[in-house]
Amino acid sequence: MRYIVFTLFLVFLFLTPFIVQAIEKPIVYYSFDDIKGDVVKDLSGNGNDGKLENNPNIIDGKMGKALEFAESRVGFSASDTMSSELFKNGLFTLVLWIKPKLTGNTWQQIFRAGPDPNDTLFVNNDGRISWRGWVGAAWAGGMCETDPGIIPKDKWTHVAVVGDAKNFRDYVDGKLAKETNFQATRGNNKEFKIGGYSGGESYSGAVDEFAIFKTPLKEAEINNIKEKGVLAATAVESKGKLVSKWAELKTVF
């Protein structure tokens, strides 16, 4: 009997890392559920709080509250955790829910790194998304761009952009929509904007559950986030829960 318990204990220890955390925590995460003044709290714990610019509207979102943009944005700065070289280095995942109006500017910046034009997630009024950036001495349009008609108007759609230093991948509602070869952008990003910069390419529509990871997530992990939300999908069980699980095993035997 003791041998059986000891064996189960070893199995439990082996499985604990997989039980504790299925997905690495994000480096930036905005749920938009608890905005105070003009501050958007970063729930990753890394202190990368955002700041509302030009008063985006707080609306009912896909999960809790969301922000609706029209010549408005959320800005945040590069930091020790949100590296200025993140997208250049090529290991990243950007996830978010979008609800675009698909009117107004033909190309709209849902997310942009700056202040010089660089890594950008666009939506086009024809319903395609496009990951673009500055490569070498020129702007690289369509580094990873889906076909038109994949993003509906005025409907919540989950989008993810993944870089693994070999390829870019666009996911729409948890399914691979486009895969292309990786291209290193110029880096040196000092700030980031959700909703885009002001001018002819600002975004009209809503965003919810915005997060950035410093690892390339797999399709199953992206779908886990899509179904559960960022917080639940990346939750870490407390030591108390793990201890109680072991206590339950001992009680059985």
Image (tube, rainbow, N blue to C red):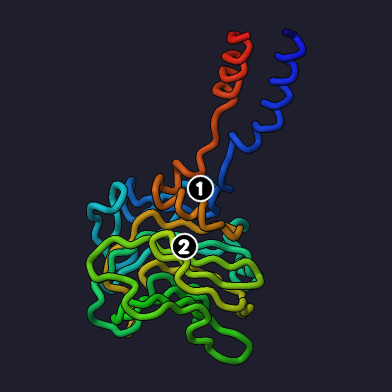
Relative side of 57 to 193, left or right: left
Question: Residue furthest toward the bottom?
Answer: 137
Quick one: 49 or 137, which is closer to the camera?
Answer: 137
Classify 10 Å Cα crowding around label 1: few (below 14), some (14-19), many (20 and above).
many
Q: Position of residue 113 (x, y in %)?
A: 50, 73
Pointer 2 local density, CA inside 10 Å: few below 14, some 14–19, many at least 20: many
Query: Does dot 1 land on a helix, a strand or a loop?
Result: loop
Q: Which residue is mark 2?
A: 76
- Does the image show residue 197? no
Tell me which corner region of the image, top left, top right, bottom left or bottom right, holds residue 168: bottom right
Residue under the image location 40 percent in, 47 percent down: 229
Residue type at tag 1: Ser
At which x and y percent is residue 44? 50, 47
Up the image or down, 20 lies above or below 153; here it is above
Q: What whole-number distance in Å separates the C-alpha atoms at marks 1 and 2?
A: 14 Å
Q: In front here: 187 or 141?
A: 141
Q: Earlier in the sequence, mark 1 or mark 2?
A: 1
State the image coordinates of residue 104 (x, y, percent, origin top left): 24, 81
Residue extending furthest right? 3
The label on residue 44 is 1
Figure check: 75 above or below 149 = above
Residue 57 to residue 241: above or below: below
Q: Which quadrant: the N terminus? A: top right
Q: Is residue 88 visible?
A: yes
Locate residue 186: give its quadrant: bottom right
On the picture, is 152 further left or further right than 163? Answer: left
Quadrant of residue 93 in the image? bottom right
146 or 111, which lies in front? 146
Which amino acid type is marked by label 2?
Phe
User: Which residue is located at x 65 percent, y 31 percent?
Assistant: 16
Give SS at disc 2: strand
In this picture, residue 34 sits left or right of residue 89? left
